[in-house]
Amino acid sequence: MKKIFYILTIFLFKFNIAYSLIEVDITRGNLDPLPIAVSPLHVDPQSDNYKDVKIKELGELISSVVEKNFKSTGLFNPLNKDAFVQKPDIAHLKPRFEDWSLITAQVLVTGKLLIKDEKLKIEFRLWDVAANKEMIALAFTTTPSNWRRVAHIISDKIYERLTGETGYFDTRIIYVSETGPRTQRVKKLAIMDQDGENTKYLTLGNELVLTPRFNPTNQLVTYLSYFRNLPRVYLLDIETGIQEVVGNFPGMTFAPRFSPDGKKIIMSFAKNGNSDIYTMDLESRLVEKITEDSSIDTSPSYSPEGKYIVFNSDRSGLQQIYTMKSDGSGVKRISFGDGLYGTPVWSPRGDLIAFTKVKGGKFYIGVMRSDGSGERLLTENFYQEAPSWSPNGRLLVFYRETKSGKNGEGFTAKLWSIDITGYNEKELKTETDASDPSWSSLLSK
Amino acid sequence: MKFKKNLKNLLIILVSTLALSACAAGKKSSTGSSNDVYTGSATVQYLATGVKDRVFFATNKSALTTASRDTLRKQASWMRKNKKLNVVLEGHGDERGTREYNLALAEKRANAARDYLLTYGISGKRISVISYGKEKPVNSASTPLAWSQNRRSVTVKTK
């Protein structure tokens, strides 16, 4: 995966951080999205052709990826290009701010690109229309086939400048692709860009696979596979395609996740009807038992600095959420509301824990603080579970299943995302039905 | 004879603990009652004449019911008669629980059936267990009836 992308150079032209006239407040649901004009990037006529990259349309394509990213946040309102009067190349040199202001744009994105000697050179600028000022100017050089990633990186830079938060557009989502009738479902590991593009299938569907999760560098994935009908936690190197079983457990291992430093896998091991939580160090292969209880302990997730673990257990009689130190000491129940709680995941910012709640025959995705206080339910549905955090801790992706009829008709499984404000709930388009999403960290850090 | 007596005592203890835990569960359960165990035979297959291949469970529970124990006793005697037979117990859950918890719960259900077969003198070497969680429903409808048919442990002949 590393080889896919090289930022060869980043030129920092100017960075006017002092004039933060425009700010997007993302702490509340934004009902008044910021009007943003994304001008198509000007294509330098001296550009060469490069393989199957459509050079003439590339400026439009890149700007539409950026636009789509901004639209998807719910915080921005990309304006219709038909209303743009200034030509891309002229706007990029010096926008006529009155014109852009007239179509209500508050910020403007301009840019230009050139393909020369098999290199794509892209430059973009972000302008504050009301203040008549340039906010960012950046340039990238990369291989032309990476134009989509550049579009996502540009989106992240703009998002970061306007919201003060880290971006999340240059990321991928790994999930389980589902096809076929429910009683004979075929499941494959699939990976796609955050915006649903570039879907690739990592397994063939010969065996059941579940719950894939990225390591911190996004090169490895841990997941559950029923290879040879032995359900075990596996490790997959995305680049080489090499898979291996994690550990040598005499029974089912499941619910795997990486530790924040990527050195360990934490998972459940089921033996004689009892599931406990274990870790395995990937280098030393040392296995440690973390919980010791006759109940079901599963769905473990580390806090971002690795000091604590959150998990669910039915030791009180019903499925509830607990935290403990990473050595298994100091177990503390944190969920006390009505109903069942499962699939806790610690936010990358450390402040919140996302979970699935089951109450009165409905499934909820919610968040609570790491001490269990401040529970907020974000969305209610017939069936949904398994939230995974965007790398900036602002969004959750999860999967949702619909009710099926007598013969299983009408059943769908889809990926959805929601802002932790509870706003901007939307379906992520996938080529097939999908479940068990896991969001990568930023690919270019 | 002594062995038989011991076995009998063990069974009494086992049955009473099961009954107790069922009571406790009945009071606590707020999601799905503990008496939503499937009692019909629509999905049931037979390992031999009169020997049902599966037992059913209440929502979020792995305790065996009286009917389940009856079925498992018949399976045990069938296995005693067919000494070369091995079985795999396949544990399952319904679609109304989180995936990972269901994997653990279904493993617990299949092991509850395994433990019962063991108390009836079947060697552990002849029984293997696999959990499919909620991945292999027998009835794909989203109805309480379908869910009750899917919460099961199925005994499958290997060789």
Image: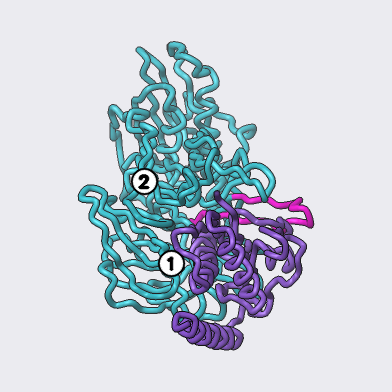
Identify the colour of chain A in the image. cyan
Asked if both marks, 2 and 1, belong to the same chain, the answer given is: yes
Q: Position of residue B123 (x, y in %)?
A: 46, 64
The range drawn in magenta is A395-414
Q: Amino acid at mark 2?
A: Val
User: Measuring 42% from the left and 50% from the top, which residue is drawn there?
Assistant: A213
- Amino acid type at image mark 1: Asn
Q: Is residue A212 above or below residue A60?
A: below
Q: Which residue is mark 2?
A: A245
Give SS at disc 1. Answer: loop
Q: Residues within 10 Å of mark 1 (few under 14, many from 20)?
A: some
Which chain appears purple?
Answer: B
Q: Chain of mark 2?
A: A
Between B46 and A180, the one lying in front of the other is B46
Expressed as whole percent of the image width and height from the top left, the position of residue A310 reads: 38, 68
Q: Residue at x 49, y 86 (%)?
A: B9
Q: Residue furthest right?
A: A406
Say which of marks 2 and 1 sits in front: 1
